[in-house]
Amino acid sequence: MSFELFLQYLTNGISLGSLYALIAIGYTMVYGILRLINFAHGEIFMMSLYFAFYGVTMFSMPWYVSFVMAIIFTAALGMLVERAAYRPLRDSPRITVMVSAIGASFFMQNLGIVIFGGRPKAFPNISLLTDVIKIGTVTLQRLTLIIPVVTIVLLFGLLHLVNKTKTGMAMRAVSKDHETARLMGVDVNRTITITFGIGSILAAIGGIMWGSRFPQIQPVMGLMPGLKCFIAAVIGGIGNITGAVIGGFILGIGEIMIIAFLPDLTGYRDAFAFVLLIVILLFKPTGIMGEKISEKV
Amino acid sequence: MLKIDNLKVAYGGIQALKGISLEVEEGKIVALIGANGAGKSTTLRSIVGLVKPEGGTITYHGEDLSKVDTKDIVKKGITLVPEGRRVFGNLTVVENLKIGAFYRNDKKAIKEDLEWVYSLFPRLQERTWQQAGTLSGGEQQMLAVGRALMSRPKLLMMDEPSLGLAPLITKEIFKIIEEIYKQGVTILLIEQNANLSLKIADKAYVMETGKITLQGSGKELLTNDEVKKAYLGESVHG
């Protein structure tokens, strides 16, 4: 393989990995604060694409307005799911909440089929994002470069929010101990709502870029990216934001490299994530940057 | 200041509090003593709204607390140092202190209070940037008390501050409690170490299986035969 071709694959891998990273952050943040795997996260991601799609096609808004609206609606949807499916079960066993999450996931998927129709739709093509450019001998879509930059900027913004602001401090405190956080005057429900909002915003940004890159959308499209990004979060060490991003990159680059170096295995590209999950669970179940698991007493 | 009247609490059919009444007067140290499972922690947890009572009233400066959410009770000046310290191990020492002042927005005063807490517990200042989870048990207890002080409490409640601590550190903590009390903070204290707590308490209540069985000034109870036998570990002859 020529070096140029390798670079081509690598940039594609980084770009796909960045998208995984954005969605994986949502899983990891919700897990961090509620110890819940938010199975509905993939559907939140899917919904963001439809919000953006209808904004442009049905309401003929300019794409940038439509995208901003889609991000806002997705954040609202994420917070609504928390309010409706998780908050009433706050004091229930974890397994109950997980079942509720799976229910919310199926519900939105099927709601999507009913409202949007099962037939795939073409995501609007924004030439500013999708134009092909040439850097040296590597040709790529402008988006391929934009995506990682956006992801890294968002990551640093998020790390700042979590580690340096009062809201972030509340989030970390709630993730450790809900009851004591309440004793400190922290509004636990509000903090959890904010967490869902942030995770959903990142999923929406990832979703919009996903749609521009793979411009075919359908109501079941949240499933596979959802599962893979959950795996990315586990690989990175669930609960850890930087870990989720690293996990996303590993998954994205790994997947593309399999196609690059082992073209015969292209059909198994989705299996790569699951094999990696099994390997991680066998040899380092806490993930790359995971905290030590200590059972709460 | 705080008045509890006929408070009843049940956990899944088990009656933890069977109608207790007590009063905390402003500017006093009040101690609750009793064996494990007597309902002391439940009493404090009810006051801050972590446990919903099934009967009775809790009034603070004449206001009914039963409808007030935990996060708002701290704004009214009641703070609980929970049993087992419960510091946020994933936050630094200074963050733990700052989160104690979470509802406050007066940055300058918060900074002053931080200095005050550091002057009470110089050990915490040495460990400002350390994660609280890496502190020793005694340091964590100091941090839990310091964190509570950061909310500028009028009523400071402490649940077993000496639990699991070496006697020397317990003594240090109790010295600080008296210091805080001298600054005008009212204190409601649960303590296994009945001897220590009765010595500093203006008023004390003895609890047994969800009821208050004895009350009096700290001195009275120190010399009470029943208390001596049950809690002070002295044998009473004659």
Image: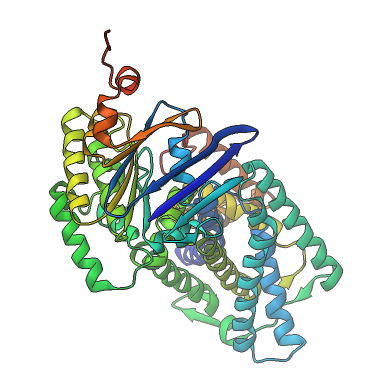
Give the image location of residue A60, x and y in percent.
Answer: 73, 91
Looking at the image, residue A103 lies above or below residue A137: above
What residue is at 60 percent from the left and 46 percent from the top?
Answer: B55
Give the image location of residue B183, x and y in percent.
Answer: 19, 56
Give the image location of residue A123, x and y in percent.
Answer: 71, 78
Total numbered badges shown on the rendered structure: 0
**Residue B216, quarter of picture:** top left
What residue is at 31 percent from the left and 55 percent from the top?
Answer: B26
What residue is at 32 percent from the left and 62 percent from the top?
Answer: B101
Give the image location of residue A146, x and y in percent.
Answer: 49, 76
- Residue A263, can we see it? no
Residue at the far top in the pictured view: B238
Specify how the rendered protein is coloured. rainbow
- Residue B150, can we see it? yes
Looking at the image, residue B214 lies above or below residue B97: above
Looking at the image, residue B111 lies above or below residue A93: below
Front one among B62 and B163: B62
Front one among A50 and B122: B122
Q: Is B211 displayed left or right of A211 in the figure?
A: left
What residue is at 26 percent from the left and 8 percent from the top?
Answer: B237
